[in-house]
Amino acid sequence: MNINDNIDNLKTLTIMGTIITAATIMAMYLNSTGNVNSQYYYNADIENGQVKTMYVYDKQGESLSGKLEYRYTYDNQGRVTSKEVVRRDARTGRMTPESLYTYTYTTDGYTMERNLWNASTHAFDRADGRTEYRRETESVMSVTNYEVAEDGTVTAITDNMLVMLPANEGLMAEF
């Protein structure tokens, strides 16, 4: 992951000033369906107010073809605990796993780990990266990327940054 991935992830995860909750995912879905000029169209399986699967379709002329699926799981507080990305294989037409993001929460932020799909073993590999999002002050969040070794230990910081917003805008929901 690089700094641009962090910025995109932070924008995605701080919609409406909240942590990654069922409401955040629902807002992302509703916002994406309202863009009539988009090349992509969205549909979702929603259970008990939570988006369980979001389907992304690519517009090709007058028809749509499946492109991606995002599969979400939540904890008992409505926070996202995992997001699995499944992509349509252009050669076979099958949906194949691509990556899995897992989220763990602390009192001052959260950690995200990314696992890539291994087609040879038909399973997700160990996390190849970890990103920590930590509230430093009311309007400052630190974002740090770490390299993760095969044994799961953090080996190095690959990049870090501070994200600042005006004092009257929150970066995350209260914990």
Image (cartoon, helix red, strand yellow):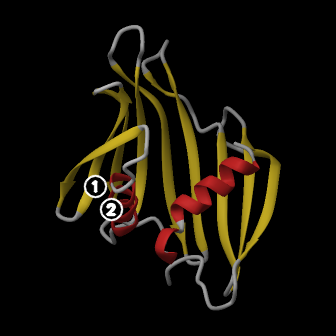
For the point 50% across and 56% down, the residue is 103
Q: Report helix, strand or loop for mark 1.
A: strand
In the rendered image, residue 15, in percent from the top left (x then y), is placed at 49, 68
Q: Which residue is mark 2?
A: 26
Q: Report helix, strand or loop for mark 2.
A: helix
In the rendered image, residue 56, in percent from the top left (x then y), is placed at 36, 38
Query: Does residue 5 lie above or below 61 as drawn?
Result: below
Type of amino acid at the residue the image marks with label 1: Val
Measure the alpha-carbon separation of dots 1 and 2.
Answer: 6 Å
For the point 57% across and 34% down, the residue is 126
Mark 1 and 2 residues: CB-CB less than 8 Å, in contact?
yes
Q: Which residue is mark 1?
A: 51
For the point 43% across and 37% down, the residue is 39
Question: Is residue 134 left or right of 125 when viewed as pictured?
Answer: right
In the rendered image, residue 38, in percent from the top left (x then y), is placed at 43, 44
Residue 74 sits in quarter: bottom left
Identify the disc placed on residue 88. none
